[in-house]
Amino acid sequence: MVSNFVHAAPADGPGGGAGPSGPVAILLCTYNGARFLAAQLASYEAQDFSDWRLFASDDGSQDATLSLLQDFQKKHGAAKVHIRQGPRRGFVANFLSLICDPAVQGACYAFSDQDDVWLPDKLSRARGFLMNARSDRPLVYCSRTRLINDTDAEIGLSPLFKKPPSFRNALTQSIAGGNTMVLNEAARQLLMRAGADVSCASHDWWVYLAVTAVNGTLFYDPVPSICYRVHARNVIGSNRSLAAQLLRARMLWHGRFKSWADMNVAALARIESDMTEENRRIFSLFRSARKQRLIPRVRGLMRTGIRRQTLLGNIGLAAATLVGKI
């Protein structure tokens, strides 16, 4: 079953949901991010929705990151800015430690990287979409991004994916940047049931997988909500350039995608009972077909209907299927 895909309307558009009322919990993960952190913190202050609480988890920074966070806490108070030590197992574990911690409370939850700049209406737009939908279902807002370099110059836009997101697509790729995601409480509870110790390729891919697996809703806003900084120390980086796409193709050929899929399959097993009947069928086919010899592998994966967003991506997926790299 395909999850709902919304090319978002303005935040004050019609709707009948009983969405989030109260502060937005901003979940910020940091590690040696002093160079760009001040600009990110300033962009929180510039939001046209000011009822937010910051939960910052630092993974052992050795630069001025903690000093910047502590100064920000002194400015706004310990009730609004919370600082904690991260698990020091990488950015994925750090983000999951925040979203799965019951002590972190908010009406909805916004992931934040340390080196981006949020546009002033990011939180108000996200809340508008979440408020206009059913609050008992997992909902995720995400958006396109403006790309900026280390001097704040705009260098383009992130890819605009045009095919509807679905569990079939989520099994093969991540399309929504975690730095744009805002989750409602139902989506957060789903992730908590899976646990903070889940092993996955990235937290944003895991959110996409989990929410679509249970037929939740992904709101995709084609209007950028953040300026995403592309620089040499990015953990993920933009996938817009040909070089980035070729690098991903190389990683797929060398088995990186297969290892990621192994992690994602193990993670999804934790919420298999929450999946729709159709998605349990797809998941079972995907899990078993990957282990088969060539002909049954190809037949099984074709039956799942898995797909990527672009023609080049689907060609790579077909090649990976043939050589057992999926």
Image (tube, rainbow, N blue to C red):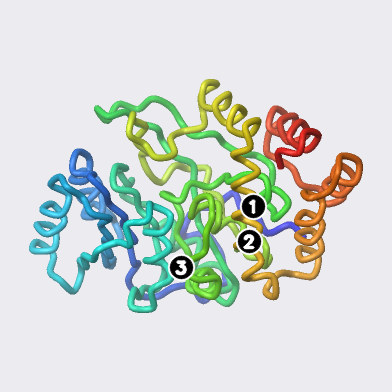
Placement of 43 over or under 136, stated as above or below: above
* Left or right, 35 with reference to 30: left
* Label located before the other in sequence (3 or 1): 3
Residue at mark 1 to residue at mark 2: CA–CA distance: 6 Å
Q: Secondary structure at mark 2?
A: helix
* Label located before the other in sequence (2 or 3): 3
As drawn, which residue projects farthest toward the top?
A: 242
Res 262 label: 1
Q: Residue at x 43, y 35 (%)?
A: 237
Residue 236 location (% of width, % of height): 44, 39
For residue 214, which quarter of the picture? bottom right
Of circles 2 and 3, the one toward us is: 2
* Type of amino acid at the residue the image marks with label 2: Ala
Placement of 20 over or under 69, stated as above or below: below
Quarter containing the N terminus: bottom right
Q: What number of labels is visible?
A: 3
Residue that mark 3 sits on: 196
Of circles 3 and 1, the one toward us is: 1
Residue 9 location (% of width, % of height): 54, 52
Residue at mark 3 to residue at mark 1: CA–CA distance: 18 Å
* Left or right, 5 with reference to 315: left
Residue that mark 2 sits on: 266
For residue 47, which quarter of the picture? bottom left
Few, some or many residues within 10 Å of mark 2 (<14, 14–19, 20+): some
Q: Are marks 1 and 2 in contact (CB under 8 Å)?
A: yes
Quarter containing the C terminus: top right
Residue 269 location (% of width, % of height): 66, 67
